[in-house]
Each structure stands twice: as structure tokens, then as C-alpha cells.
Amino acid sequence: MKQLYVVSTGPGDPNLLAPQAKMAINDATDLVAYGLYLELLGDDIRNKTQHDLPLGQEIERARLSLNLAASGKTTALISSGDIGIFAMATLVFELLDRAEQGLENNPEWFDIDIQVIPGISAMQAAASRVGATLGHDFCAISLSDLLTPWETIETRIHAAASADFVISFYNPVSKKRRWQLDKAKHIILQHRDPNTPVVLGKNLTRADEHIRIITLEQLEVDDVDMLTLVQIGSSHTKHIKIGNHDWVYTPRGYQKKMTQETTT
């Protein structure tokens, strides 16, 4: 059987790599990924054939994975976090869709058994580090306008802010993209209090992890890089201090039930 595993490796801590993902990586002869994702897997992959394609070659990575699997090599296409969230899984199916339409001359791809293995995404890791920011309705928005027009992104930010979602921003900045996060901040300030809690999570769950809890008003572009997840609370999100710990959570509405308990 021709096999392609589409594998999520989580935010970085090897203890958060799902057993199913480990099994897929162990089973594969060939691993395809951006180099950093391979490095995070450590010595466990030293006996595998590794195909390291740089940032910007996502289509090439997906196509290579399909071609390797079609040639009979058990292949794992790897992304950190969850590979189905702003990552490589969608490209695999876009290419298959194109092949079905005759736009890719690769009918051999149709014989591949594809298994998508989920993982812990950055927004989940950030939430767990500070408490429970995703306790009520939330959304994720990528601020990268390389593939999506900024006008579309801006419309989504307005909608998410006005609907009072907790918002997780992926791809908040890069070396060349510096203004989008500041623009997003000012859009959200039209709908949120300046003291709304914001969580900045860099290199989440890795050895050099850095977490900051600030306010929306304090959010600055220079405090964020491409490895940072920016999570902006809803109007109900709370930042509390319990002993020496800071926690951020978004209540779901149980306060009404607890109030009823104390009055009956």
C-alpha cells in the first residue's frame, strides 16, 4: 500500500507529540518538512531520509510528499502545531483536487492512502500556559497577506472583534510585514477595552519559551516576531493573580449557575 502520513508534531515539546504521530514518523522511510520541524524531532529521525525544503516552498513540499508516496516510499509530511491549521494539509488536498481536474498530470497520486494526524496548535498551547483563554467562543486569523488580500483579512478582524471572539493571530509579523499587527490592534480597540488581556507566546512549550501577559493598549509590534502567537481576549476575558501565579481565562457563563447556588 502506498502511504502518505500528514503529520502534526505539536508546538515543540516532544511530550506533546501524539502517540499516533510518533507511530507515523517511525513507520515512514522519508520525512518532508521545513528544517526547523525536523530539528525539533531530535535524534529519533536520524535513520530517516530527510527532505528539508525552505520556507516559501510549501507547494514543492506537498508535491514532493505525494510523489515520494506514489513511488512506494512510506512518507511523512510534517508540520509543527496542527498540520491542518494554517499549515501543509490543505496543500495536499489542493494538489489532489487539481489532479482530479486534470491540472496536475499525476494520476498515480490517487492510489495513495492518506492519513492526517492532528496535533496541538499554538493557540491551544498558549491558552494552556496561562489558564483557559479559549473557554468560550474564539477564532484564529492569519495576518499574512502573502496569499490572502489584506482587505479580506481586515474584514474578518472587524467581524471577529464586533462578535466578541477571543482572537488568536497567527503569522502576526515577519521581517517584511510590520504594519498589519498594529492595524489589527486599532481595529480591535474600536470594540474592546484598552485593558483587555493579551497573551504573547513565543516558542511555545520549547526550551526557550517566553510568555507575556499584557493589555491590548500595551501591544507593540516590536514585542512580536514570526514565532509568536498573539491571543487577544474577549470583553469577558479576565486576568487574575492567585498567589504567585498569573492566570487568564474566558468564562463561559457558569457564574449565573453559581450565583443561583448561593441564593438557594
Image (cartoon, rainbow, N blue to C red):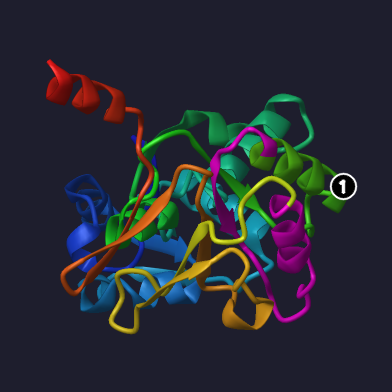
> Where is residue 199 shown, x and y percent of the image?
46, 64
Q: Is residue 144 visible?
A: no
Residue in view at x 70 percent, y 55 percent: 189
Residue at the spot x=37%, y=51% of the render? 124
Residue located farthest toward the front when viewing the structure as drawn: 263
On the rendered structure, is 179 left or right of 31?
Answer: right
- State the residue in front, 244 or 90: 244
Near mark 1 (Cα within 10 A), the count class, few <14, some 14-19 or many ≥20, is few
Residue 141, given in percent of the width and then of the height, sits at 63, 48
The residue carrying mark 1 is: 151
Whether residue 183 sits left or right of residue 236 in the image: it is right
The answer to which image quadrant residue 3 occupies is: top left
| Outermost top residue | 264
How many callouts does the rendering have?
A: 1
Residue type (three-letter) at the residue carrying disc 1 = Glu
Magenta span: 162-189
Q: Position of residue 95 (x, y in %)?
A: 66, 39
Is residue 166 in the magenta section?
yes
Residue 56, percent across and down? 69, 67
Which residue is depicted at the point 72% across and 81% down? 175
Q: Nearer the viewer, residue 109 or 185?
A: 185
Q: Is the N terminus in the top left, top right, bottom left or bottom right quadrant?
A: top left
Where disc 1 sits, the SS reads: helix
Quarter that holds the C terminus: top left
